[in-house]
Each structure stands twice: as structure tokens, then as C-alpha cells.
Amino acid sequence: DQQVKQNSPSLSVQEGRISILNCDYTNSMFDYFLWYKKYPAEGPTFLISISSIKDKNEDGRFTVFLNKSAKHLSLHIVPSQPGDSAVYFCAASAINYGGSQGNLIFGKGTKLSVKP
Amino acid sequence: NAGVTQTPKFRVLKTGQSMTLLCAQDMNHEYMYWYRQDPGMGLRLIHYSVGEGTTAKGEVPDGYNVSRLKKQNFLLGLESAAPSQTSVYFCASSTDRATQETQYFGPGTRLLVL
């Protein structure tokens, strides 16, 4: 049973517009959430994170929103650029519970295509 | 400053053969991880290590063994490869669990088992 779900396998947006990538989770113990970006033939790279005590975290063009009651988070990219075209993975962990709960659980990813 | 490196980059095995994937990191990280990624799937944790000489099972450990004899190296072994182990394998390291210091990933090893 998937604990982290990214229900949109792909997303296409025009350069300059907003990209919104969504992620849902089922495990209420999750208290830390991350987004990773992956280009073909490369390993994932960290993009942005958010703790469950916050509802928003911003870093330049990237903002992550967390809605704990809905068990939903989203990544906003504004403005989108062609170089943002990649697969984006949502990941979650239960850091404060220790042990194996601190391991990251990844969603299946969303492939973002930003068209010039 | 190489970060996380993986050897080899690509390998083809026949069913039943064995091999070892090597992961090395030069960031003095305590934690190291092995993941596999299958088409249309997220990364799934195979094994991990919280320090030199320690290893633990992740989500999908069956068919794999690991060793962490040196802090900078984390080896993933397949004793008897099966076609179901065809995948892309990623190694990662971190100073702590994924909080402020996140996991740094290697470029991946593509393994094909025939």
C-alpha cells in the first residue's frame, strides 16, 4: 500500500507559467517532507523540504505547501523554466519516531515538461 | 570533491551470477543507503547503514546483502542474480536522517539480469 502518492505521472506547462506538483500521504506519523528533482541518467537531487510544524516553505522560485489535515503537499514553481523539466519525487519520513521510521518513503514521481 | 560515486555504471548479468556494487562518499557522512528504482516506481530502500560496521534492512532487502567495513564505502551484493533484480540502483549518503542535511545521491548503476 502506497504511503506517498503522486497521482499525476506527467505535467506539461508553458515557460513562464506556474507549475504545481501534488503529493498525498497516508501515514499520519510523517513529520518531514522533501522534494527531489531527477534528470535522466543522474541521481536525484534535493530541492526543498518542509517540517510538519510549518505550512509553507519558500526558496527562490520554489515553494512547498503542506496541508496536514488533508495529508497533502504541493510544490509550486514560479516562473517555470525549460531547465525545470525533470522528474520530481515527493518523499516523506517520520523523523521524530526514530529507527526505520526515519527512512524516506518516495512517491512514484511526476515528470514535468516545461515548453518554451 | 566527488560527492557520492558508484561503480560500475552499467552491468549485464546472467541469472544466478553474483556481483557487488560499490558506493563511495567523500563527505564523511555517517548514514548511507541503497535504493532501487524500477520503471514507473519511486525509489525503494533496500538496506541502509547508520555508521561504520552497522547495516539494517529497508523496504525490499530480499536477495541482497550489504557491508559497511569502512565509513566511506557501502557495498551492495547480489549472491544469485534474478531477472526481478533488473533495476537502476542508487546509493545515497547523509550526515543525519533526512532533515536539514538531506541525502546526496550517486549517479546510479543500471543492472540488467538476463
Image (cartoon, coloured by chain):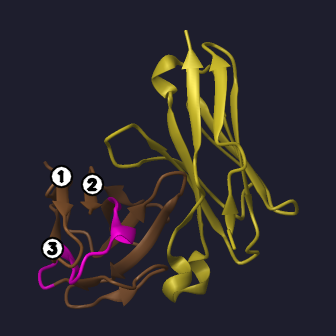
Chain colours: A yellow, B brown
Inspect the image, locate mark 3, and give the three-letter code of the amino acid beneath it. Thr
In terms of secondary structure, where does tag 1 sit?
loop
The residue drawn where x is 54% and y is 51% is B40
Inspect the image, locate mark 1, and give the three-letter code of the amino acid beneath it. Lys
Inspect the image, locate mark 2, and give the three-letter code of the amino acid beneath it. Arg
Which quarter shows the C terminus of chain B? bottom left
The tag earlier along the polypeptide, 2 or 1, is 1
Q: In this rendering, is residue B76 above or below B113?
A: below
The stretch of residues the image draws in magenta is: B69-88
Badge 3 and badge 2 both on one subunit: yes
Which mark is on residue B20? 3
Picture coordinates of residue A96, whole percent (x, y): 60, 80
Q: Measure how far apart labels 2 and 1 are at the Cα level.
A: 6 Å
The tag earlier along the polypeptide, 3 or 1, is 1
Residue B8 is left or right of residue A28, and the answer is left
Task: Give the crowd class for mark 2: few <14, some 14-19, many >=20 residues within 10 Å.
Answer: some
Q: Measure how far apart labels 3 and 1 are at the Cα level.
A: 12 Å
Task: Give the crowd class for mark 3: few <14, some 14-19, many >=20 residues within 10 Å.
Answer: some
Is residue B43 among the parts visible in the rendering? Answer: yes
Residue A59 is left or right of residue A74, and the answer is left
Picture coordinates of residue B76, whole percent (x, y): 23, 76
Which mark is on residue B9? 1
In terms of secondary structure, where does tag 3 sit?
strand
Residue B14 is left or right of residue A41, and the answer is left
Q: Nearer the viewer, residue A47 or B89?
A: B89
Is residue B72 among the parts visible in the rendering? Answer: no
State which chain disc 2 sits on.
B
In terms of secondary structure, where does tag 2 sit?
strand
